[in-house]
Amino acid sequence: MPGDFGFFRRHQERRRLDTIARLVPAGGVRRVLDAGTAHGWLAEKLAGRGFEVDALDLGMDSIRRALERTRPMRLPVRFIGGDVYRLPFRDGAFDAVVASEIVEHLDRPGEALAEFSRVIRPGGFLVLSLPWRERIEYTLCIHCNRKTPVNAHLHSFDEILVSGLLMDAGFAPDRIVGFMSRPAERLGFSGFTGFLPHVIWRAADRVFCAALGRPCSMAVRAVRHE
């Protein structure tokens, strides 16, 4: 995980990436697009599962850092600069697209989902992760004197909202997962259990989410219509 993350945040991020990567089906999927890859941590996870990965980001500095970090690993990952509204790929180029923590930043999320649909083959998969029912906080920008979201998050999503966007873009939601119990994470659950296998952590996290009802994150897997 990124070196500037603290102990607990680092373990939270590892659990989040593992949860997302495991939602990509192993069967029938070979080529995967990691849209909004940042420094390539999720692309690395996906490559570790045996997928051929194209990792795209708008920030060329992020692409450079990802290349520098992963080059010694010789991963089957190709890093590309590009915009999710105009993906530089042919129709149906991918078996799956993964977009982790980017949809909430987009001013036109429906357009991005339609573009993901274009590059996924019929019957292929889209996996999204995003905050669940986030309370968006604002600050007053000193430059433009306007309300500005603190984390650059423009939208707050729940299961109903994201399902509607997916169906409008030509997808059928297949699985929706709430994970990382907010109260448990405030107590450092992911950090204190970082030594446990993912399957054990996830089972305990399911119990917390069911009992307390406040996951931090939501991951959605959807199937592109034939």
Image (spheres, rainbow, N blue to C red):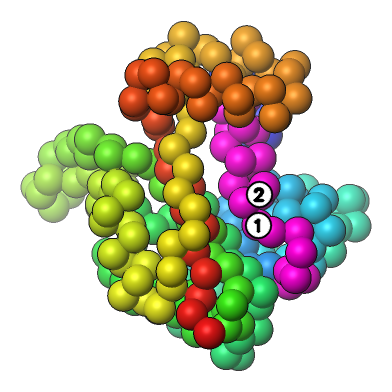
User: Residue 15 in magenta?
Assistant: yes
Which residue is found at the position 68% from the left and 23% from the top? Answer: 200
In the figure, is residue 153 to the left or right of 121?
left
Judge whether residue 62 can be spotted in this image: no
Provide the residue span drawn in magenta.
Answer: 11-31
- The answer to which image quadrant residue 122 occupies is bottom right
- The answer to which image quadrant residue 81 occupies is bottom right
Look at the numbered discs 2 and 1 and tell me whether their residues touch, using CB distance below 8 Å. yes
Question: Which of these two is toward me, 152 or 208?
Answer: 208
What amino acid type is highlighted by mark number 1?
Val
Which residue is found at the position 23% from the left and 44% from the top? Answer: 149
What amino acid type is highlighted by mark number 2?
Ala
User: Residue 70 in magenta?
Assistant: no
Question: Which of these two is toward me, 118 or 35?
Answer: 118
Secondary element at image label 1: loop
Secondary element at image label 2: helix
Mark 2–mark 1 Cα distance, whole angstroms, equals 6 Å
How far from the left and from the top, in percent, is residue 191? Answer: 61, 16
Question: Which of these two is toward me, 149 or 122?
Answer: 122
Res. 21 mark: 2
How far from the left and from the top, in percent, is residue 2? Answer: 65, 35
The residue carrying pointer 1 sits among few (fewer than 14), some (14 to 19) or many (20 or more) residues within 10 Å by Cα, namely: many
**Residue holding disc 1:** 24
- Where is the N terminus found, in terms of image quarters? top right
How far from the left and from the top, in percent, is residue 77? Answer: 78, 64
The residue carrying pointer 2 sits among few (fewer than 14), some (14 to 19) or many (20 or more) residues within 10 Å by Cα, namely: many
How far from the left and from the top, in percent, is residue 9? Answer: 55, 24
Which residue is found at the position 28% from the left and 38% from the top? Answer: 134
